[in-house]
Amino acid sequence: MVKGYFPIDKFNEIKTPFYYYNIELLRQTLSLLTKEANKYGYHIYYAIKANANPKILSLINSYGLGVDCVSGGEIKASLNAGFDSNKIVYAGVGKSDWEIELGLDSNVFCFNVESEAELEVINEIALKRNKIANIALRINPEVNANTHHYITTGLAENKFGISISTLYQIIDNIDNYKNIKLIGLHFHIGSQIMDMLVFKSLCVRVNEIQEKIREKRINIKHINLGGGLGIDYHHPNHINIPNFKEYFSIFKQHLRLYSEQEVHFELGRSIIGQCGTLVSRVLYVKQGTNKKFAIVDAGFTELVRPALYQAYHRIENISSDEKIEEYDVVGPICESSDVFGKNIELNTIKRGDFIVFRSAGAYGEVMASHYNCRELPKSYFSSEIDF
C-alpha cells in the first residue's frame, strides 16, 4: 500500500465512489510515449474508447496525439476536446449511416473499413455528398494475441476485420469504388498483450501481406498497427508506465517498410490505464460462515471489468496499517457477479475505510452504467488540477 499516492484528507470531503486521476503520472506517460515514438517517426492515435473524460482528452491532445474513434459519439467528443479532424481515425465494425456522414462532413483523416459491404456503403454515401473518403482496410491477420478471448480481435472467429483471402479480391476491385481512396492497411490483434513476441509475429504477417499487395503494383502509404500493449495490473506501484521503448523497437526491428510509408499506432490502455483509481468506502464488514465480506459502495456499475471478463485489479485499503486479513470484496449491486475479488489479503477493514481499485483508468469510468438507477461516478484529479 502506498498511502502517499492518495490525498486521503481531500478524499474525506468527497462522496464515494469516484474516479481519481494522477495527472502527473499521465504527463510522465505521455512524455515517454512521444519520446520513444518520435525516435522512429511513428504516429500515435489515442484510442478514446479507453477513457473519454474531457479533461483527460484535452491533456492528451496537448501532446500532439491523434485520436482513434469507434463511434459517432467519440468523433464528437474528440472534436469538442480540440482534436483536429485530420488527426481522427474512424474505426468500428458497425458504422451506421449517420456516423459515416458525420465522419465525411467532419473530414476525418481515415475510415478503417472492416468489410466489403461497409466499403460499398461508404462509397455510396460519399458519392451523395460529393466527397472522397480516405480508407484503410482492416485486415484480420490470424495472429493469436494470447489474451482473454473477450479482448482478442485478430482471429478468424472474431467479428473484426477482413480475412486475408477476401483482402486480395477487394484490392483487385478497389478501382470500382470511385469515391474511395485506399491509403492504408489496418491491423489490431487484441488488447492487454504482455508478450512482445506476439507483436513480432504481427510484423511477419504484415510483411507477407505487403509483399503480395506490392505484386499488384499498389502502393500503400499508411500502415496502422493498432494497439494492444498491456499494463501491469499486479504491480501498479512499481511498474506504472509500460515499456514503450521495447514495444516500438520490436516494430522497428521486424517491420519491413517501403519508401515514404508511415507507421501509425492506436494506443489506449497503455496511456491511461495506470493513471486512474476507483475510490470507494466500506459500508459493512460481514462475517460469513467461512469468510469475511467487505461490502463497498462501488459496484460493477462503476467498474465492470471484473464482472465482465474476470479482470484483476489490485485492491488496497488505504485507511489501515493493521494486520493482514482475507476478505471477499463485493459491491452493493443486486447481482451475484458484483464481486471485485475473492480471498483478497488486505489490512484489517472497518466501516468507512477507503478501498481503492488500482489501474482503473482504462475501461473504468467510460463503461460505467446507471444500472439499479445509480448515479454515474464523478471524476477528480491530482494536485495539478483543483478538486
Image (cartoon, rainbow, N blue to C red):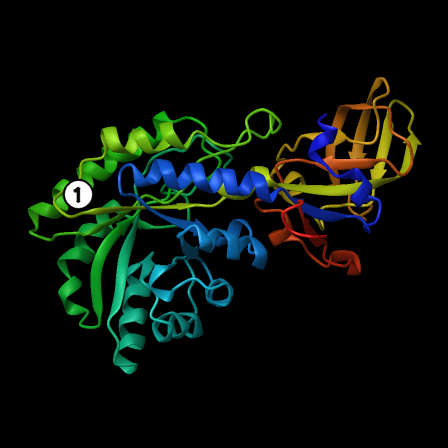
Q: Nearer the viewer, residue 335 or 107?
A: 107
Q: Position of residue 365 (x, y in %)?
A: 64, 51
In the picture as drawn, the residue positioned furthest to the top comes out as 323
- Residue 171: name its quadrant: bottom left
- Residue 90: name its quadrant: bottom left
Q: Name the residue at 84% across, 44% down.
A: 12
Q: Name the residue at 15% across, 62% down.
A: 173
Q: Name the residue at 18% across, 47% down.
A: 261
In the figure, is residue 162 to the left or right of 81?
Answer: left
Q: Position of residue 343 (x, y in %)?
A: 77, 24
Q: Position of residue 247 (x, y in %)?
A: 37, 31
User: In the rendered view, would you say 171 is above or below 239?
Assistant: below
Q: Is residue 187 visible?
A: yes
Q: Quadrant of the N terminus?
A: top right
Task: Find numbered disc 1 in the image and state the secondary structure of the residue it sits on.
Answer: helix
User: In the rendered view, would you say 116 is above or below 266?
Assistant: below
Q: Name the residue that disc number 1 marks.
A: 210
Q: Nearer the viewer, residue 74 or 171?
A: 74
Amino acid type, residue under disc 1 in the picture: Gln
In the figure, is residue 154 to the left or right of 14?
Answer: left
User: In the rendered view, would you say 34 is above or below 324?
Assistant: below
Q: Is residue 53 visible?
A: no
